Image: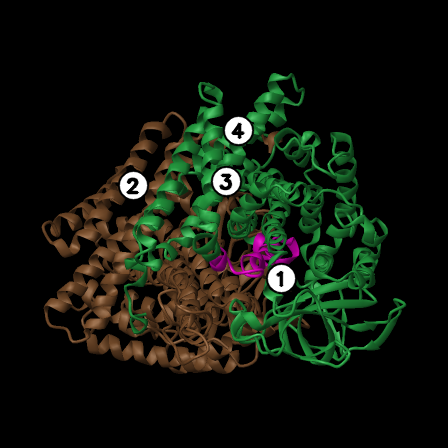
Chain colours: A brown, B green
Amino acid sequence: MPTYTANTKDMQFVLHDVLNVSSAGLPGYEDMDRDFTEAVLDAAAKVSAEVLAPLNTVGDTEGCVLENGVVRTPTGFDRAFAAMKEGGWTALDCDPEYGGQGMPYVLATAVGEMFVSANMAFNMYQGLTHGAYSAIHAHGTPEQKAKYLPKMVSCDWTGTMNLTEPHCGTDLGMMRTKAEPQADGSYKITGQKIFISAGDHDLAENIIHLVLAKAPGGGEGTKGISLFIVPKFIVNDDGSLGARNPVSVGKIEEKMGIHGNSTCVMNYDGATGWLLGDLHKGMRAMFTMMNEARLGVGLQGYAVAEAAYQNALAYAKDRLQGRAVTGAENPNGPADPLIVHPDIRRNLMDQKAFLEGARAFTFWGAHLIDRGHKAGDAAAEGLVGLMTPVLKGFLTDKGFETAVAAQQVYGGHGYIEEWGMSQFARDARITMIYEGANGVQALDLVGRKLAQDGGKHVMAFFEMVKAECKAHEGDERMKPFTDALKVASKQLQAAGMFFMQNGMKNPNAALSGSYDFMHLMGHVCLGLMWTRMAKAAYAALDAGATDTAFYEGKIATGRYYMARQLPACGMHLARIESGAEPVMALSVDQF
Amino acid sequence: MPTYTANTKDMQFVLHDVLNVSSAGLPGYEDMDRDFTEAVLDAAAKVSAEVLAPLNTVGDTEGCVLENGVVRTPTGFDRAFAAMKEGGWTALDCDPEYGGQGMPYVLATAVGEMFVSANMAFNMYQGLTHGAYSAIHAHGTPEQKAKYLPKMVSCDWTGTMNLTEPHCGTDLGMMRTKAEPQADGSYKITGQKIFISAGDHDLAENIIHLVLAKAPGGGEGTKGISLFIVPKFIVNDDGSLGARNPVSVGKIEEKMGIHGNSTCVMNYDGATGWLLGDLHKGMRAMFTMMNEARLGVGLQGYAVAEAAYQNALAYAKDRLQGRAVTGAENPNGPADPLIVHPDIRRNLMDQKAFLEGARAFTFWGAHLIDRGHKAGDAAAEGLVGLMTPVLKGFLTDKGFETAVAAQQVYGGHGYIEEWGMSQFARDARITMIYEGANGVQALDLVGRKLAQDGGKHVMAFFEMVKAECKAHEGDERMKPFTDALKVASKQLQAAGMFFMQNGMKNPNAALSGSYDFMHLMGHVCLGLMWTRMAKAAYAALDAGATDTAFYEGKIATGRYYMARQLPACGMHLARIESGAEPVMALSVDQF
């Protein structure tokens, strides 16, 4: 059975050596010194390893079962959920006014990485609740907040997000679920929603569904959509639970992975709901949570891969097979461990260099969100808005690729369920799809984010990369980083230029290259992260850090990324510059 | 439920327009005119669509079950297997002396593509039998051939290949299964084998296991290994079935995919076996079937992806979601079909361009095997030996990637098992692993095949590519093909040069780039195939072919491959030229 041990050392490195959170001077960051974050991370690591990880295989094997209209979660999930609530792990970055601990989002993100690595499907019950909490926190009336938030912060009640219907996912304008206004100000919600994660289960007393539906008078398409609070049990004014709302589970979907989470078809049969936020402004209300939600999915992509990598690494050190081509390294054993073989190392280095870069990128994104939310830093908010599709699309594509690569290290054993490597690949696969399929992320990036606010955010990003390279001019040690980053960022700018010159005449010229652009930009972002990490590692070594193996390993891993991953940028640019013609040449019938 | 319709038109194009099989002048090719191959392909297509494809989901859902020591295959597999035998589909390219139809391997390969696309797990029962048939055909005594082959050709008896043990897969030198010689010339086989595809089942009266084991006196490592015939039921001299041999199923493995095939742990408890081929030359006997076996797995990689692509394409034409950015294309409907969106097309074109290239590459490989076997063409045999790791490694990596890309077209529905797209991805995954994991293929290519026979085969390949480019000099229409192919093949040669210059001093410098080299060479091979296909399509158009949409579509798809896929070559070269240092820099403890 696979195991998981949180890489708290690397998390500390990113938080302190790279992001310098303790001197960020942000509201809520007052306690963020090394000791404090270490204490939080260590405690979370313990819960992850001891409570969550042992249930990961159980969740996959047993899945969720629908019996007489009631969903039963896998064995042990209830006890683990109680332990998470008891430990306060559901409330980390929530508002203290409603029982939260008010910690920075960046720290909650680090802890979230562990929980996802240990047990992605389990963590979704809490993750969806957090999303619903954020929506009510941002758009609810004072009464709604008082009524729902304390119980959601504690996860006594969980939450869901209901967007998709059988005939529409991305294109929500075609939504059919309707909301009929009632005399008392409530609405009757009727319709079917599908793919509802944590739609029903036995872990909480109540479930607060947030449901998009069309109320009369809003017009066609997405304009007519509003957001409603539809509790499984109506909550009385004194906080007690009242009548069962007519919302039921149609079925639990059989999925490729994340079996431990109940993905439900939800039927709303005139269920009572209350408007959340403004009438006919439901899409906007949903989108305010988008950056966090998508960053959270990007995190899932690499966090699952991190767990896969750890097990692949252990296997590569342990499994004896063949001899090193340069001479036996385990001469007294029957064979050498797999890790002596260059191609196994190439594979492991691909994984490691991605994962550490992804962690830095994600924590940086979370830190930018903190800057936006806690300090009103509009530039940070614009930058993370630009980054969001890259965080989601690039990290989940590469995360899945990494989980598959980790599985490959096991050979045939990787294909057998009992070793657990298949589950990592199957679980990671969903992250490329939900919360906006990655093609939609690419469209958001190229069709919307690049030009947003007159292109100011992407220009700021280019300037930031340029400044980073310039800051190390003349530093020979940094040359492998800055040289490669310069080339890659020029390729990114050339791609942007191609879109500007051709996209106006023919939008397809830009959109045909959108996916490659997302990956090109992802590599530049990770190149930037590795440049910053290398700088931080050299600074630590120069300052006499005793853990030289860690810092030197960090630099070597970064050099690998620059030498072996950044060359993908040239390929992406060439694809982009081939334009729309090869992509659009065939008539539909010629396919 | 997914469907499958064989692309016989494209198969005919490859066989006749590209490979010109009817004028190849090879023994056994006498009947290979367009009408004959069309008749065979059409009949196979009918069986694939009507008998095999409908059982693909059934096989995945039900899997195989072990009850009281007996393996039960999924519902309907027995009837389908009987239909395949009845139709003569198990005997297509087998030796007429033993009841086969003696057709060319290239035609059996085309038919095999269909069977795998329709139902990979099912086809393995027959596929493994064919492998065992080939081994006995090549190495058996006349008595062994007479005793086993007729029943194996008809699939009244099936076959297996037993190599892997729990502690050794790639490194068979550590094998523990032993063979003790008996007074009557037979051997007692004792040991445990794992991952035995079609190890036991209820589809045949008898199963002929081919088992690698160590007989006394052979020395250490792989030198001591011999190959044995170990029937489930001993076959009497009159051909009737005798005693049950003590070989039993330990368990059926729970796998990520190919659930319809029973992958067994096999326990040999003093089972009676007979030496096949020479004592202590078992590895060599196994390796004589290697080219076909690995080509067969490469075929599985793209054939499963072909089925996935067909369904993704149908979904993209059918599913209405969003509007074309250049204006509504289905103005009277609620939305446009997915296929109007450039990024969906980009995805579909990636799939289509790979699949058609892979088909041509595989058929070409099979044709080279025919040249070697039927006409003693040593150059063809050397060339296909060089290509074999590329056919296996590149086509399965890209095949899996393609199946995942097809799944992505479905959005959330791709993750739900009922749509069948998850199965394609899960089934395709094994092809990267078995019959030598793809890292081992890369090692075989760079560590062995490049230098084989003084490097003569790779030089011949370079010359072939050069000649292909030269043949179209001055042909403006062919420039997008020859220009791109020239660049890519120069990059491939530069990579080979890097290995020669650095690999002698440090073998790790070559092996660190082996995986990238395999992919770089794969792209050059597909670039060569596309150049040949474009030439053939132009020739057909020039000759007044009426189906212009097909031939023009073929050329446009080829242009896509050259413009959008060949740029990967530069990336692979850059990775290769970064050498061993970034790959080997970390100590084991620094990971």
Q: Which residues are magenta?
A: B414-441
Answer with mark 3 or mark 1, whichever residue precedes in sequence: 1
Work out how far the residue at label 2 is from the one at label 1, CA to CA, in angstroms.
50 Å
Residue on which the image places disc 3: B525
Please name whichever residue, B346 or A178, is drawn nearer the observer in this view of the structure.
B346
Q: Please, which chain is the residue tagged with disc 1 on?
A: B
Work out how far the residue at label 1 is from the one at label 4, CA to CA, in angstroms.
42 Å
For the residues tagged 4 and 3, is the chain the same?
A: yes
- At x 49%, y 34%, the residue is B464
Please name whichever residue, B394 or B192, is drawn nearer the observer in this view of the structure.
B192
Label annotation for residue B420: none
Label annotation for residue B286: 1
Q: Is residue A404 left or right of residue B235?
A: left
Please name whichever residue, A551 or A60, is drawn nearer the observer in this view of the structure.
A551
- At x 36%, y 28%, the residue is A502
Q: Secondary structure at mark 2?
A: helix
Q: Residue A542 at what x, y percent from top left?
A: 10, 67
Q: Amino acid at mark 3?
A: Cys
Q: Please, which chain is the residue tagged with disc 3 on?
A: B
**From this viewpoint, is residue B552 visible?**
no
Work out how far the residue at label 3 is from the one at label 2, CA to CA, in angstroms.
29 Å
Task: Say whether residue B427 is magenta.
Answer: yes
Q: Quarter of the image containing the C terminus of chain A? A: top right
Crowding around mark 4 (Cα neighbors within 10 Å: few <14, some 14 to 19, many 20+) is: many
Does the residue at mark 2 contact the one at mark 1 (Cβ under 8 Å)? no
Q: Is residue B33 above or below residue A183?
A: above
Answer with mark 1 or mark 4, whichever residue precedes in sequence: 1
Q: Amino acid at mark 2?
A: Leu
